[in-house]
Image (cartoon, grey):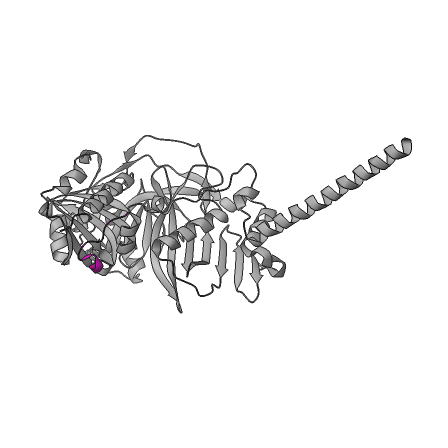
Amino acid sequence: MSQRKTDRIEHLKTGILVVLFFTTILLLYLLWSLDSQSRFRLPDILSQRQAAETPEAERMLLPDRVIYGLGDGSYRLKDSDTTETLEECLLALREISGESDASITEITAEQYGEAIREYRSLAINFAYAIPYRELCARWEIPRVQGAELVIGADTLAFSQASAQSIFIAERRENKYYRLYSQRDVDLFSVMTEQEDLSKLTACYTVGTILGGENDRLIPLSAESNLVPLRWYEESEETSQDVRRTLAEALFGENFDFVRRITDTFGNVTYMYGYGQKTFTQRVDGVLEYKNETSEGAAGGFFRDLETALSFVSAHGTWGSLDGRELRFFLRDARAVSAGKQEGYRFWFGAKMLDQTIYYESGVPIEIEVLDGQISYYRRDVISVETGGETYGFRPVQDPANVIARNYNHIYNVMTGNMLAVNEESAFEYVAQAVEDIRMGLVRIANDDRLRPAWILATESGQVFYFSLYEATPIGMGK
């Protein structure tokens, strides 16, 4: 009996070992399969983090600003909580486009300008153009007669000059259109009746306040509760092991053939082949990935945007790893090409408490898609400390005063002329060059705090940063 009992135990041990062996083989197979499919995710690796969800493309499309014209030379500006206004506009666009006799006709820039400036109006502006055909397909907007004329749209507008119309503009291309309804409907009133304009920022054209003919808008005055906030690089929270694992995820099954190069400054680059793929971890916290893409089929605006959003979710996260909550949004988009390949490059900005965070150089996330594949990815996301001093709303330096105090500085930088010039000529030059001025938080080089600032952009692409409460220069960039 003792011998038979011993034999049974040995057989049981053998069976257990066989099961463990095949279980190990199965687990290794699954692990290698995940690796080869590049399905490791940075949020999975980081402790106490869940995998990042991919945001919907529509959620990233925030109007740059909504402008209400009062028809008397004054305007009211809304640059936060603009999503609801956009949704109402798209519903109106779908409703009018569904009419059998609705049509789109091209109009002149003068006709559009008259409708917006000389009558009560509402303009919803984007910082980039969205292909109109794709916009209609995405929101199930019927294609009406004349829709083929519209290539891109960066503005959707309403005006009492033609209350039954929706105006469509692509300002970069100086193209303007009118979608006209044959029904007796007042679209302008429908779009504006719920908005309390008295709570919005009053604006006038630069020409009205400073003289000249510049029709860009600047606030007459403003107040803010913004204070300096400490920030740090997102990558400071991740160890070298985590960064290596991120590199492995980017290269997938080819990681065994990847070279690791460290330069004299401490920047680490992983390279596959002769540069077909590179991933660089810079000492300043920037992560940069480059990939030679193969020829394929172009995806279009929304499909490429979804490809970009999914890639960031799989190899990072749409948010800071700690600190205050950030909301990312599509800040700019441009069609690009490389040889026969076509696609889009997207720049993503970040907002905190409805205030945009500006970088003296670069943006939080930049990504390029060619023929449906990621060709470039740059990540420079920061985390912002919670807590700190808080204040109530208080007056800030008004934009006209910012320009009046600093026009010599702006002129010298823009022209490269450091010699004495006629002050009146310099002031007129700067007033005409102003393209935009708005409040925000700015990250300045070698400063560990985000600074409340006026951000002044010029028509040449140069950007100047001035302290919000003192109007002194604190930085500049492009």
Identity of the residue drawn at 32% across and 53% down: 463
Quarter residue 129 falls in: bottom left
Q: Using the image, determine if residue 444 lies above or below residue 110.
A: above
Identity of the residue drawn at 21% across and 49% down: 156
| Horizontal relation, residue 74 to residue 279: left or right | left
| Horizontal relation, residue 181 to residue 444: left or right | left
Identity of the residue drawn at 55% across and 42% down: 44
Give the x, y percent position of residue 259: 61, 61
Count of numbered tags: 0
Observer-nearest residue: 454 or 193? 193
Give the x, y percent position of residue 284: 50, 51
- Which residues, given as a range, are shown in magenta? 140-149
Residue 62 in sight here: yes
Q: Tell whether position 363 is magenta.
A: no
Give the x, y percent position of residue 310: 45, 49
Residue 359 in sight here: no
Observer-nearest residue: 239 or 87? 87
Quarter residue 264 falls in: bottom right
Q: Using the image, determine if residue 261 lies above or below residue 238.
A: below
Observer-nearest residue: 17 or 206? 17
Quarter residue 416 falls in: bottom left
Identity of the residue drawn at 32% across and 56% down: 462
Q: In the rendered image, which quarter contains the N terminus?
A: top right
Q: Tell whether position 142 is magenta.
A: yes
Q: Using the image, determine if residue 368 lies above or below residue 120.
A: below
